[in-house]
Image (cartoon, rainbow, N blue to C red):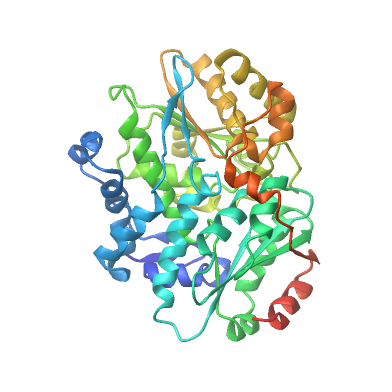
Amino acid sequence: MLFYNLNKPSEKVDFKTATIQGLGSEKGLFFPERIPVFPVSWIADLENISNEEIAWVVMKDYVGHSIPEKMLRQIVAETIDFDIPLVRVSENISTLELFHGPTLAFKDVGARFMSRCLGYFMQHQDRPITVLVATSGDTGGAVASGFLGVEGVEVVILYPSGKVSAVQELQLTTPGQNITALEVNGSFDDCQTLVKQVFSDPELNEKIFLTSANSINVARWLPQQIYYFLAWKQWKNKSKPPVISVPSGNFGNICAGLLAYHSGLPVNHFIAACNVNAVVPAFLKTGIYQPVKAKPSLSNAMDVGDPSNFVRVMALFNAQFEPLKKMMSSESITDEETGDAIKTLYSEYGYAADPHGAVGWLALSRWLKSHPGQEGIFLETAHPVKFPEIVEKFTGKPIDVPVAVQELFVKKKNSFRIPADYEDFKNYLLNRKR
């Protein structure tokens, strides 16, 4: 399997190179040259196949010969060694809970897979590698956890000051060791722009061995397909494929779901559930893609005004607008509607959702009301304890705090504050102690 650069299709690399490089030239994202299509019989038999075997089958063609089969099987087993349950919420709606991993967020899957792949690749490198990651909330903690203590790897996390929750900030600023957190005076888009600028800077790339751990990296993005297959494994009504609503910010998660669909996974329709940062909902209405400055919201991990992975979504549909619109719709949910959704989910169904899951549920509920007879799944992407003030405000009930989170509150935040200025960031990378 080769991956080509969406900005320069003649540039083709294998999985190892795509993982280590992160981005191609001209800031291009890598995309698989072909999409594996799984046998109908295999998908029909998922209930009888172990999660580890499913994960291996989903990933093996993408990884190719870059990692031996025995090692890849070990990597995928460690990637998903926690529960990923499909939970019934109401008569026609279930939720796929993706918050049972070590940092209580869906990004544990991609971060654990990538960290283990990169750890394997670095055994054969003669110099350390610096992993850069911009986070709007959960990515930072997941990457910090996944890469903590990995030999030969240094991690630098950029996050927008004052725009992540207290738990999220502690998860990415307290690990220490090979993890460094940079608190940026700006938005997530500013953080993401700084990371992208680094990879197009020849001087910096000559002096420092760099890669990215955002979902722009294929090793972060691709494994997110796995839990869509695990959802289908648990789906009871196999004669009626679900509508899947995905809380969407940078669009890596829903893009992975669409990739799984193109590989043969039965899905009726996808909903990109967005907050007030409605670039994609506007595009699907007008056909005009216009990035905007990100606005802060209750669902902060989705505060993205120029989603990087949307170019991959378009590539899946050969840049054809109508086929995309047929398979994926998008809904914009306000903060007021998000709060009401949290309240309704708890009062009517006894389910405590985080703000992102609430956005996904409301977008799905609206779709099902206008499409009677269909059933759906919304992705619950983070544990509500990561947003205690918001969730408790609308449920009126205190959240049970897991032990792992209780331990965070006795730790001290450790971050370096920087402006959203590329030259400052570049100087920091060149002069920091390693």
Residue 320 at x, y percent in the picture: 46, 44
Q: Name the quarter where the N terminus is drawn.
A: bottom left
Direction from residue 245 to residue 178 in the image, left or right:
right
In the picture shown, does residue 192 fall above or below 51?
below
Quadrant that contains the C terminus: bottom right
Which residue is more in the foreground, 256 or 141? Answer: 141
Is residue 136 visible to the viewer in this orientation of the structure?
Answer: no
Q: Is residue 90 above or below residue 276?
A: above
Compared with 82, 177 (above or below) is below
The residue drawn where x is 31% and y is 34% is 233
Spot occupied by residue 293 in the image (x, y as percentages of width and height): 75, 49
Q: Quadrant of residue 420?
A: bottom right
Percent position of residue 26, x then y: 57, 70
Q: 11 left or right of 380?
A: left
Q: Residue at x 37, y 32 (%)?
A: 267
Is residue 96 visible to the viewer in this orientation of the structure?
A: yes
Name the residue rendered at 35%, 55% in the picture. Answer: 76
Which quadrant of the structure image shows residue 340?
Answer: top right
Left or right relative to 149: residue 116: left
Tell me how many marks there are: 0
Residue occupying the far left of the picture: 41
Tell me residue 124's x, y (percent). Answer: 39, 81
Q: Residue at x 71, y 25 (%)?
A: 339
Front in this rendered view, residue 278 or 154: 154
